[in-house]
Amino acid sequence: MVLKCNYIASRRGARIARHNMMKNETCPVARSVDIIGDRWSLLIVRDAFDGMSRFSDFQRSLGMARNILSDRLQKLVAAGILRTQAASDGTAYQEYVLTEKGERLFPLVVALRQWGSAIFSPAASHIPS
C-alpha cells in the first residue's frame, strides 16, 4: 500500500502536510488532523483519558466557550472518537466516553505529553516569541 501526502513549505521552512480537500485523500496524517487536529479536540480527548466525561467538567478544565465545546464534542462523536451514554449516577445528564477508536489515540496523547515535558520547562511559555 502506498501512502501519499502532499507537502508544502511553511513560512519557517518546515515541511507540513497539506490537506488538499480531495474526496479520496489518502494521507493518514491529513485524515487524522481533520478529526483531531484543532487545539480543542485533542485537549478534549486528553481530558477524557484523564477521566472527565461531563460537559461541565470539560468546560471547567478547558475554559472554552460552551458553543465551541458543544461543536467539538459533536464532531468527536460523529467521528466515532467519543460516544454519549446516560450519566452513571442516574441523573438526566449524558456523559462522553471514549470509544475503542478513541482509546487507540492513547499512544499519541502519551507521546505528546512526553514530548512537551521534554521540550518545555514548567515555567516556559508555550507560545513562541
Image (tube, helix red, strand yellow):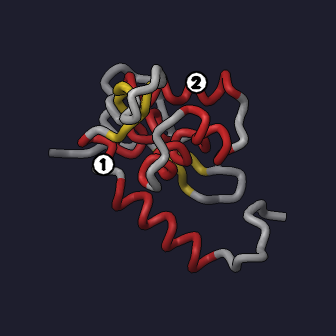
Residue at the location (60% across, 50% down)? 9
Could you say which quadrant of the image residue 88 lies in? top left
Q: Tell me the element at label 2.
A: helix
**25 up-or-down from 14: above or below:** above
Amino acid type at mark 2: Ser
How many circles with numbers are drawn on the protein?
2
Q: Position of residue 41 (x, y in %)?
A: 53, 39
Cα–Cα gap, marks 1 and 2:
21 Å
Q: Position of residue 4 (x, y in %)?
A: 31, 43
Residue at the location (49% across, 52% down)? 46
Rate crowding at label 2 as few (under 14), some (14 to 19) or many (20 or more) other CA atoms within 10 Å. Answer: some
Amino acid type at mark 1: Glu
Rate crowding at label 1 as few (under 14), some (14 to 19) or many (20 or more) other CA atoms within 10 Å. Answer: some
Q: Residue furthest front?
A: 90
Q: Residue 30's mark?
A: none
Q: Circle 2 is placed at which residue position?
A: 70
Residue at the location (38% across, 43% down)? 5
Residue at the location (42% across, 33% down)? 96
Q: Residue furthest left?
A: 1
Could you say which quadrant of the image residue 1 lies in? top left
> Of callouts 1 and 2, which one flags the residue occurring earlier in the amino acid sequence?
2
Q: Tell me the element at label 1.
A: helix
Nearer the observer, 12 or 79: 79
Q: Circle 1 is placed at which residue position?
A: 103
Is 116 on the left-hand or right-hand side of 95?
right
Q: Position of residue 109 (x, y in %)?
A: 44, 58
Nearer the observer, 47 or 39: 47
